[in-house]
Structures are given as C-alpha cells and as structure tokens.
Image: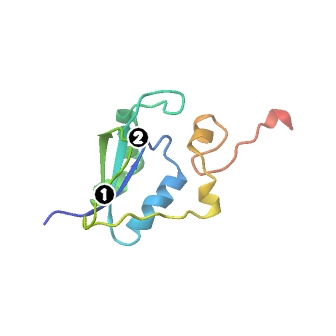
C-alpha cells in the first residue's frame, strides 16, 4: 500500500514560519505532508519560478525529506480545488494563532519582515 499524504497547495513565496506552522499541524499528528507548488507566472507578487521555490524548499525542509515524511512537487496553476461526495479524504482548515496569522510573504519579499515573522523597522526614521 502506498503512503497517504496531507496535501498543501500554495506558492510558498517566501517560505516562512507560518508555512512551517501550517504543515506541522499534520506532521505533529504523524501524517506525511505533500507540498504542491503552484506553477504561477513570475510577477511582482511571485518573484520566483516554481523551480526556484522547489529548490529552496528542498534545502529548507531537507530533514523532512530525508525522514520520508515530506513530498514536494510542482503542479500547474489552479483556479479551484473541487471534490464530490464520498471522495475518501478530508478537507481541513487550520486556524493559525495571531502571531502566525500576521506573517506576510509580501512583507518578507519587500524586506519589511523576516521569515520568522519579525517586523523590520527602518532605523533611519527613528
């Protein structure tokens, strides 16, 4: 029998503490995780190609890959995720705590936040 996975679909630009919190919700239950990287058009909000994100995640999450609890792949961009009745899997929403919910990939990309969710203050304006 093949492994089952808790699947997460996203752009993962830039990988941050909030993303790790999210996948830890299933990893901490002993589940395997599949990170599906959407192959989106490179633009201001998506400065990296899916291939670049894939390579970064392989480094960032090497420990999970080596343990065999993580699978990463690139998928075509999607409009929606749809399912019918009795499909044999759950659709689960994870409500992040405030300190995780406030982390912003956009703020990280623009240099206003670290990947740990810390705000970078402009020291020249103090």
Which residue is rendered at x = 35% and y = 51% of the image?
A: 81
- x then y, percent, for residue 116: 59, 51
Name which quarter of the figure residue 50 lies in: top left
Q: SS for tag 2?
A: helix
The residue identified by callout 2 is: 56
Colour style of the rendered protein structure: rainbow
> Left of 37 or right of it: where is 101?
right
- x then y, percent, for residue 28: 41, 70
- x then y, percent, for residue 23: 43, 59
Q: Residues within 10 Å of mark 2 (few under 14, many from 20)?
A: some
Could you tell which of marks 1 and 2 lies nearer the N-terminus? Answer: 2
Q: Is residue 22 above or below residue 79?
A: below
Name which quarter of the figure residue 121 lies in: top right
The residue identified by callout 1 is: 83
Q: Of 86 and 115, which appears nearest the observer?
A: 86
Q: How many marks?
A: 2
Q: Is residue 65 above or below residue 42?
A: below
Q: SS for tag 1?
A: loop
User: Image quadrant for the C terminus?
Assistant: top right
Q: Is residue 22 above or below residue 44?
A: below
Q: Which mark is residue 29?
A: none
Which residue is rendered at x = 34% and y = 47% of the image?
A: 36
Q: Residue furthest right?
A: 126
Q: Residue furthest top?
A: 43
Cα separation between marks 1 and 2: 31 Å
Q: Of 42 and 16, which appears nearest the observer?
A: 42
- x then y, percent, for residue 77: 36, 38
> Left of 123 or right of it: where is 107?
left
């Amino acid at each position: 029998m093949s492994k089952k996975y808790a699947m997460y679909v996203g752009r993962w630009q830039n990988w941050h503490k909030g993303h790790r919190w999210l996948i830890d919700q299933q990893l901490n239950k002993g589940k395997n995780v599949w990170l599906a990287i959407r192959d989106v058009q490179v633009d201001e909000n998506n400065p990296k190609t899916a291939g670049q994100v894939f390579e970064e995640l392989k480094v960032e999450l090497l420990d999970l890959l080596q343990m065999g609890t993580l699978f990463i792949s690139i998928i075509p961009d999607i409009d929606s995720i749809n399912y019918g009745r009795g499909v044999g899997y759950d659709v689960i929403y994870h409500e992040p705590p405030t300190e995780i919910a406030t982390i912003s990939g956009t703020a990280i990309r623009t240099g206003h936040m670290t990947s740990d969710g810390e705000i970078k203050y402009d020291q020249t304006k103090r």
